[in-house]
Image (tube, rainbow, N blue to C red):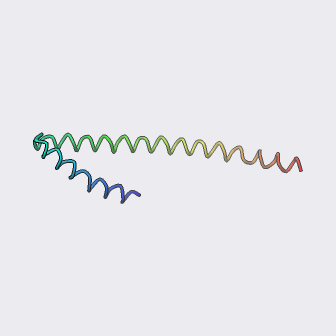
Amino acid sequence: MHIAAFNVGIAIAPWVAGLVIDADLGLPAIGWVGAAFALAALASTLLDGRLTRHHQHTTQNLTAAAPDTCQAATASR
């Protein structure tokens, strides 16, 4: 997935930069496009970290609860 994401970025960024140039915004505007892509990458990285921590926390809670559930099931037999 990481390599695919890099390839998407490599393909889309120059295309968007070309659109900026065609819109007569000038070459300096390409820097703003690069900054926007960098902010989007930072935001997606932070979101990924948060979702990963949430998933790990949820998984730990389920794992901790699982032995109790198994003991209750065997005790009722």
Quadrant where the N terminus sits is bottom left
The mark tally for this picture is 0
Residue extending furthest toward the right: 77
In the image shown, does 56 or 34 lie closer to the viewer? 34
In the image shown, does 71 or 34 lie closer to the viewer? 34
**Residue positioned 34% across, 42% down in the render:** 42
Residue 65, image quadrant: top right
Position of residue 50 measured from the top left corner of the image (x, y, whole percent): 47, 40
Residue 24, image quadrant: top left
Position of residue 48 measured from the top left corner of the image (x, y, whole percent): 44, 45
**Residue positioned 13% across, 46% down in the render:** 21
**Residue positioned 32% across, 56% down in the render:** 6
- Against 47, residue 74 (above or below) is below
Residue 49, image quadrant: top left
Position of residue 68 measured from the top left corner of the image (x, y, whole percent): 77, 45
Position of residue 29 measured from the top left corner of the image (x, y, whole percent): 15, 40
In the image shown, does 16 or 4 lie closer to the viewer? 16
Give left or right: position of 4 versus 31: right
**Residue positioned 18% across, 47% down in the render:** 19
In the image shown, does 51 or 18 lie closer to the viewer? 18
